[in-house]
């Protein structure tokens, strides 16, 4: 029996990382896939915890070595997911959360069509603007760029299996937990563990 892949995507500022981190803290069976990125660390971030931080030359070398399950350029920086790291976690019967954009989600779905994809949305673009301003991390120009990119991201939400509207964080977290629990209850996931019981039917 192997674990399940969950893909979580969202426009910047929708609360994707906060939701995923809260789920992982509450569920020992879930692991977060740590991506490689060419962007510089933000204050408080550590190499190997939030991301593996590498320069473009090293990232390109990893591409040539076919290390990545998926990779994409986002806001001028590259992000990639290690295929080996994902398979190792799955083989240990751990569910793996991938925080990636819609481009990466497409690539992963091509290789792992059984992966469950979830799109996190803000209740409105205006709410998203207020959240981005409230983070205090970006200039007005960057915020406007992120909002424009968010509109493009949202245009791809129909490609995903589930949509979570993050208006109330606690409710959105319960929605995310419910999706994970429901997938674990699917017969195809339960059968290997309870094979002898199912064979009585």
Image (spheres, helix red, strand yellow):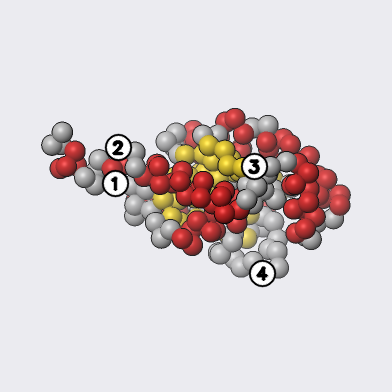
- Mark 4 lies on a secondary structure that is loop
> How far apart are the alpha carbons under marks 2 and 4?
42 Å
- Mark 2 lies on a secondary structure that is helix
Disc sitting over residue 121 in the figure: 3
Disc sitting over residue 44 in the figure: 4
> How far apart are the alpha carbons under marks 4 and 1?
37 Å
Q: Nearer the viewer, residue 105 or 40?
A: 105
- Of marks 2 and 1, the one in the foreground: 2
Disc 2 target residue: 187
Reading the chain from its start, which is encountered first: label 2 or label 3?
3
Task: Please rate how many residues cluster around mark 1, counting C-alpha atoms within 10 Å: few if below 14, some from 14 to 19, many from 20.
Answer: some
- Of marks 4 and 3, the one in the foreground: 3
Percent across and percent down for residue 56 are 67, 53
Residue 155 found in image quarter: top right
Residue at left offset 34%, top offset 52%: 93
Reading the chain from its start, which is encountered first: label 4 or label 3?
4
Reading the chain from its start, which is encountered first: label 4 or label 1?
1
Disc sitting over residue 1 in the figure: 1
Reading the chain from its start, which is encountered first: label 2 or label 1?
1
> How far apart are the alpha carbons under marks 2 and 1?
13 Å
Q: Nearer the viewer, residue 19 or 56?
A: 19
């Amino acid at each position: 029996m192997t674990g399940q892949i969950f893909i979580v995507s969202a426009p910047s500022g929708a609360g994707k990382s906060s939701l995923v981190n809260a789920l992982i803290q509450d569920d020992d069976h879930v692991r977060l896939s740590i991506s490689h990125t060419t962007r510089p660390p933000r204050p408080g971030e550590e190499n190997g915890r939030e991301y593996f931080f590498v320069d473009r030359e090293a990232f390109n070398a990893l591409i040539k070595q076919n290390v990545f399950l998926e990779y994409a350029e986002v806001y001028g920086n590259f992000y990639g997911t290690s295929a080996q790291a994902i398979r190792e976690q799955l083989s240990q019967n751990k569910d793996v959360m991938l925080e990636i954009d819609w481009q990466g989600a497409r690539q992963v779905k091509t290789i792992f069509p059984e992966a469950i994809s979830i799109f996190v949305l803000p209740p409105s673009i205006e709410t998203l603007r207020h959240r981005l301003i409230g983070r205090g991390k970006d200039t007005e120009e960057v915020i406007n760029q992120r909002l424009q990119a968010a509109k493009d991201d949202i245009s791809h939400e129909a490609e995903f299996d589930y949509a979570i509207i993050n208006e109330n964080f606690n409710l959105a977290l319960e929605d995310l937990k419910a999706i994970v629990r429901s997938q674990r209850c699917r017969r195809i996931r339960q059968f290997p563990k309870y094979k002898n019981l199912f064979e009585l039917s």
